[in-house]
Image (spheres, rainbow, N blue to C red):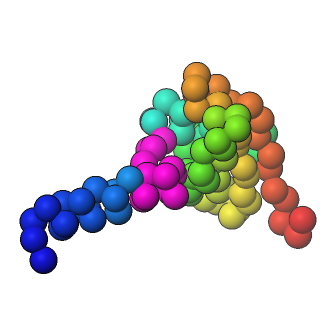
Amino acid sequence: MNLKSVVGTSAIAAVSLLIVSPAIAQSVSSTTRNACIQRTAEKMVVATRDVMFVSAGPVSAESGARTLFTRNSQTGQTAECRINTIDNTVLYCVVRHPGW
């Protein structure tokens, strides 16, 4: 195997990873994460220190929106926070109540 084919294969793999998994390629900024935590805490009527960031879904190719998942560390209650990745605004937040 020569160096040219290894470099070419590596480049193709890297580009494929970026296309297939945009969530890995784009991290969530602390500003965006904090905005979601703030909105979630308001919806749950708890202190922001009780809400933690869990994970982020992929970025929508059509809208540029992304869903962040949060959890209340005291009760285990979860929420989904939809954000606009272009201007990092919170579009909406849905709190999931246990048993729903």
Closest to the observer, 19 or 89: 19
- Residue 38, placed above or below residue 57: above
The magenta stretch spans residue 24: yes
- Across and down, in percent, residue 75 comes to 70, 62
Q: Is residue 78 left or right of residue 34?
A: right
Residue at 24% x, 59% y is 8
> Image quadrant of residue 92?
top right
Does residue 72 sit above or below 59 in this rendering?
below
How far across and down, in percent of the image, does residue 76 sit?
Answer: 69, 64
Residue with the most extreme bottom position? 1
Left or right, 98 with reference to 11: right
| Residue 12 is covered by the magenta coloring | no
Position in image of residue 21 (x %, y %): 50, 57
- Residue nearer the viewer, 54 or 12: 12
* Secondary structure, magenta segment, majority class: helix
Which one is in front, 82 or 86? 86
Kindly indicate the quadrant of the structure image that contains residue 64: top right
Could you tell me which residue is drawn at 38 percent across and 53 percent down? 15
Horizontal and vertical percent position of residue 35: 59, 32
* Residue at 19% over, 66% down: 5
Q: Is residue 1 above or below residue 7?
A: below
User: Would residue 9 appear left or right of 70 to someone viewing this image?
Assistant: left
Q: Quadrant where the N terminus lies?
A: bottom left
Which residues make up the magenta segment?
Answer: 16-28
Asked if one can make out residue 38 in the rendered structure from this viewpoint, the answer is no
Which residue is located at x 84 percent, y 59 percent?
97
Horizontal side of residue 54 vs 39, given as left or right: left
Q: Residue furthest top?
A: 87
Q: Which residue occupies the extreme left position in the image?
A: 3
